[in-house]
Structures are given as C-alpha cells and as structure tokens.
Amino acid sequence: MTFFICTTCAVQFDDRDRPPESCPVCSDPRQYVPDTGQRWTTLDELRREHSNDIAPQGELIGIGPRGRVGIGQRALLVPWGETNLLWDCVALLDEQTAVEIERRGGVGGIAISHPHYYSTMVEWAHRFDCPIHLSSADAEWIMRPDPAIRLWEGDRLDLGHGVSLLRLGGHFPGSSVLVQENGSDGRGTLLSGDLPLATPDRRWVSFMWSYPNMIPLPAHEVRRIADALTEISFETLHSAFWGEPVTDASAVVARSARRYVAALETVGATG
Ligand SMILES: [Zn+2]
Ligand SMILES: [Zn+2]
C-alpha cells in the first residue's frame, strides 16, 4: 500500500495499492492537470530528490522544498506559546527538517489556509504529534482522512496566544487567514495563503478565484473580503510564496481591493 502524492498540487492521498484515477484538486477549475497528464509521486521519492530550505520570512521562519514541488508554496512557523504553529504545509517532510524545527521549539499545531496546501499535512501531524485545524467548509477536499484533523465551524477560531483563524471564503468556501495579534511589534501580522495574494510589486495584493487559470473573483466578493479585513489591523502580510512580506498591509489591502473592483467594473465601459 502507498500514500500517493499528486505531482501537480502535492496533495497526498490515503493508502491504496495503485494511484487514484485522477486528482480531484487538479481536475477542479481552480487548478489544472498538465498537458503531459496526471502524474504521481511519493514522499520517499520527494525525499530522494529534494531538501527543504528553512529561512527567515520577515520575523517568521519559512519552510519549503528547494526546487519546485507541487504549487511551490512555503509554510511558515509562527511562535505560539512554548512551541510553534505551522501555517500552511509543504509536501516534503524529512528528518533533517523535523530536527531543525524541533531545535526551534517544534510544532504544537497545524492550520492550513485552503485545500491547495493540504499536501502531506497528516505526515506532519504524526511526526509532531499535533492536531490539524481545517475549516469544515472544505471538508470534501480532504484526500487523506485522519484522527489528527479537527474541523472548525463558523468564521473564526481562537487558537490562543494571540493567534486566530478567520474564514474569508472566496477562493474556496473555507479559505482562511491567520491573524497574529502580537506580530509586527504588536501591530499585527496577517498570513493569507492565496487570498489576498502578494503581487511582485509589494505595494499591492490580488484577489483571484483561480490563479493558474487567471479567473478573478467577482467584485462583490472582493468588497466583502476587504470589508471583513477592516475588522482587524495588521502591519505585515505574508502570502504563500517566498519573498519579502507586504508592509503597511491593512492600507495595501484596502487600496488593492478598490483598484481591483474598479478594474472589474470598468471592463464593460471600455470593452
Ligand atoms: Zn493534484
Ligand atoms: Zn489556492
């Protein structure tokens, strides 16, 4: 029996004697199956071919495979009491990574923004003997069920130590962000996964339903999400990929939402 991993999204499936027929995450219009076809790998294969980079991301620590694995996101280690919370997840977990994380206080819990980053979350939960917090709104996307998974309901989950999850929806019904109240010298840090996503120009963020297929969210959804984010304040925003965080981030999100909605709503007038 093997726990197969989809090569394109790096989500791991429950154990079986042959690969699944298809990957529901990549067959969904928010992702894609490459024109070379559906391919599968395993954690052992990833361990042979890759190692993780562990490096600062602003005041947090990023963890992500060197060389492209799946969508290419990196996870973040968020100080959480005596230990850390792992925000989002990456497919490659090897002993070297685990030892390095243990040296920094280990992982006491895992929270993931949305199904594109579920990856090998169960492997991480077993290695660190900790729970995984997922929005119940995305339960159908769990490809490897496990007792470590705890589904949370509603729009907000307080995880203690000034850390909470806020469900914004939009990209997926359960798409969530992590709010670290005491981050950025008490001015607040937002970890956003794919929504809002930092753009190459760090003065702006974007709000898409599908990034690889470039399908925007409707204007009313962008307004709703930007409004929800005015309820909290945050100086810094990290989205899912390596790079400098966005600063003055509350203002950046509000300004970006206005620009984005204006672009959507002027298409009819100019086109
Ligand atoms: Zn996939
Ligand atoms: Zn995504």
Image (spheres, helix red, strand yellow):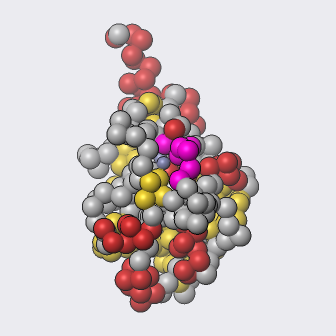
Q: Is residue 181 visible?
A: no
Q: Position of residue 268 (x, y in %)?
A: 42, 11
- Residue in view at x 31 percent, y 57 percent: 68
Quadrant, the N terminus: bottom right
150 horizontally vs 179: left or right? right
Q: Residue at x 43, y 23 (%)?
A: 264
- Quadrant housing residue 74: bottom left
83 or 223, which lies in front? Answer: 83
Most common SS among magenta residues: loop
Check residue 20 for magenta coloring.
yes
Nearer the observer, 89 or 193? 89
Relative to the observer, which residue lies in front, 135 or 24?
A: 24
Looking at the rendered image, the quarter that the C terminus falls into is top left
Quadrant in the picture for residue 206: top left
Q: Residue furthest right?
A: 153
Name above or below for residue 77 compared with residue 35.
below
Is residue 20 visible in the rendered structure shown here? Answer: yes
Residue 8 image position (x, y, % from top left): 41, 49
Residue 54 occupies quadrant: bottom left
User: Residue at the location (31% across, 68% down)?
Assistant: 50
Q: Which residues are magenta?
A: 19-26
Q: Is residue 258 above or below residue 98?
A: above
